Image (spheres, helix red, strand yellow):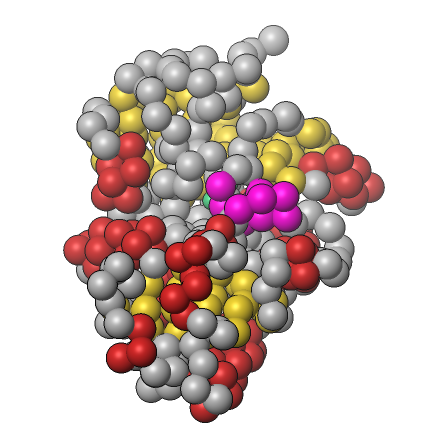
Amino acid sequence: MTEPVLTFTERGIYCPAGDFYIDPWRPVSRALITHGHSDHARPGHGAYLATEAAAPVIRHRLGEITLDTIRFGERRQIGRATVSFHPAGHIPGSAQIRVEVGGEVWVASGDYKLAPDGLCETFEPVRCHAFITECTFGLPVFTWRPQHEIAAEINHWWATTAAEGRHCLLGAYSLGKAQRLMALLDPEIGPILTHGAVENTNAVLRAQGYALPDTHHVTPDLDVKAYPGALVIAPPSALGSTWARRFGRASTGMASGWMRMRGVRRRRGADRGFVLSDHADWPELHEAIRQTGAERIFATHGYTEIFARWLNTQGYQAEVVPTEFGGEEDAADSAEDAA
Ligand SMILES: [Zn+2]
Ligand SMILES: [Zn+2]
């Protein structure tokens, strides 16, 4: 029997032919990284490879690392494997990783969504024999409305709250969701203020050329009264914190796919919940899988059991693969601290 292109080990997804790992969760000598979220880009690896577009954020978060970059679509030989990175549409720079060994092609999706968001590189389907897919929102209840409808909802909330002379405090994960919102919302309504965690990421992305509207960093000496009708974008954990008190009787909101679930908004203590996710919804997961043409599917990261069972009824050969993805971002949001 020939060796599989990718295998699943306790350190992460491993390619024997190239002796490298994809998004490993334990220190390894060579790691290919799909994107900068902390459950995928972890510290401690000997050498990193990521897209040119994802590299600045990964460097910003991990500090001094040995990081090599690759352009989207560029092919590189590693041992007996040929690898290339393709847009995943999840956050700026995020990639799916294609690995080819002896004519057999496997793709590891990382996190992805299909609908273009106007900020990050749009998802590109990649033909393969086997597809390792995330399924963070792999339940039929998760279907997203078009982004422009959600934008209109948030703009309306912002405009009416501003008219009452109050601030809007919007919880959104600091890498990806926050910037997507900035690019999406109507800056004519009022000024946009940002928490430090969000502003640091903004600075990295602006330096790369991603177009973001003007924002004002909320520093300790910033007088918030000088910004009436402002929308304040902060990580979800900051919403109920002492940091948030300076905004007085602000109206609070959360933007996340988890807002689709009853009770999550209330548990987060937000007045409003906006269903906006950087992950594929149920129909998008099926569409992405169909477009790969793959027969073998490995489900990771989310509602794996239910999703794999459904795929098996649809004629796919689907398996669940245990991973340690899901942590700081959207994926972990129902539990703790994300967007
Ligand atoms: Zn992610
Ligand atoms: Zn993830």
Between 301 and 168, the residue placed more toward the observer is 168
Residue 207: which quarter of the image? bottom left
Whether residue 98 is visible here, answered yes or no, is no
Compared with 50, 48 (above or below) is above
- Residue 254 in sight here: yes
> Which residue lies at the image location 38% right of the left edge and 82% below the top edge?
229
Give left or right: position of 282 versus 330: right
Res. 219 image quadrant: bottom left
What range is drawn magenta here? 328-337
In the rendered image, residue 315, in percent from the top left (x then y), is placed at: 77, 40
Residue 156, given in percent of the width and then of the height, sits at: 51, 84
Q: Pick out the residue farthest to the right.
A: 313
State whether the magenta stretch is mostly helix, strand or loop. loop
Q: Residue 141 placed where, x, y %?
A: 75, 58
Q: Residue at x 54, y 68 (%)?
A: 253
Nearer the observer, 174 or 113:
174
- Give the residue at the far bottom of this rendering: 163
> How many numbered marks have been drawn onto this rendered protein structure?
0
Image x and y of residue 325, in percent? 54, 33
> Is residue 332 one of those drawn in magenta?
yes
Q: Residue 260: which quarter of the image?
A: bottom right
Please tell me which residue lies in front, 307 or 217: 217
